[in-house]
Amino acid sequence: MTPYYHRDDVAIYHARCQDVFACGDAPVVQTLITDPPYFGMEYALSVLTGRVPYDEAQDAQWLGHLCAWYREWLPLCREMIEMATGRAWIFASPVHLPALARTAHLIQWPMRQCWFAPESEALVQFGRPVPEALAAAVGQAVAASRHPSRKEAAVLDAIVRASGDGAVLDPFAGHGGTLVAAKRAGLPAIGIDMDARACAAMVTAWEAA
Ligand SMILES: C[S@@+](CC[C@H](N)C(=O)[O-])C[C@H]1O[C@@H](n2cnc3c(N)ncnc32)[C@H](O)[C@@H]1O
């Protein structure tokens, strides 16, 4: 698949990540960092705010859809990471966390660590365990962050430092914060997003970094 943008140390694909993985062009990487789309959040927020009454059967069906959605891409992501040494870092809201944890369990991909930003998202790490001091630095950065949709540079930098050398992949790359953090660390990066505006923003952010 032809990248939307390509330089020696960066490739950006304007596509669904499932399609990029399926075509086999993206290389296996050392690190995957991603903030997946907030699929199904509208329903979850409607229940939380009381706009939709809680219904057990409907809720179970919603969780089933969410798990099926994770199952579409999580196994593919695992295959993109160096088996012995690689690490994956996935942001998940409290609403998504059960579906992520359950899907990971079903595909036998153990969660290594999980950090929580107060009243906000969790950051879950898979793959090779992280040395204690680097893990503590990630935890501190997460605890100090407010975790808006655009991930904070301090959090991404701590994750990249804890991941070791090698290429970094973000399959739901949005505005490109992951790519920029990789560039700051002198590492090659691959970003994928199905949204044209996100891809354009990624190029701008990467060139400006
Ligand atoms: C939560 S946002 C990422 C936000 C990111 N942290 C940032 O700093 O901008 C998720 C992104 O995933 C993209 N997306 C959704 N489904 C996708 C898919 N199947 N493949 C690739 N990108 C997808 C959306 O266009 C969106 O930009």
Image (cartoon, rainbow, N blue to C red):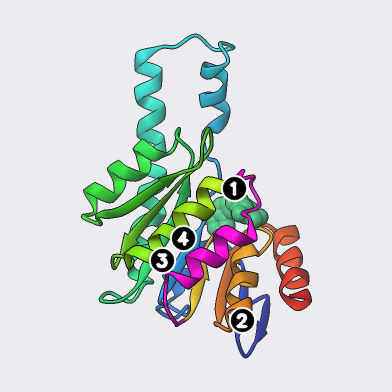
Q: Secondary structure at mark 3?
A: helix
**Mark 4 to mark 1 CA distance (whole Å):** 12 Å
Q: Is residue 127 above or below residue 97?
A: below
Q: Earlier in the sequence, mark 2 or mark 3?
A: 2
* Circle number at residue 145: 1
Which residue is label 3 attached to?
A: 134
Instruction: Tell me which amino acid carries mark 1.
Output: Ser
- Residue 197 falls in which quadrant of the image? bottom right
Tell me residue 207's x, y (percent): 76, 78
The image quadrant where one finds ligand 1 is: bottom right
Residue beneath disc 4: 137
Q: Secondary structure at mark 2?
A: strand
Establish whether ligand 1 lies closer than 8 Å to the Cβ of label 3. no
Relative image position of residue 185 (x, y in whole percent) = 57, 79
In magenta, the rendered stretch is 146-166
Screen quadrant of the C terminus: bottom right
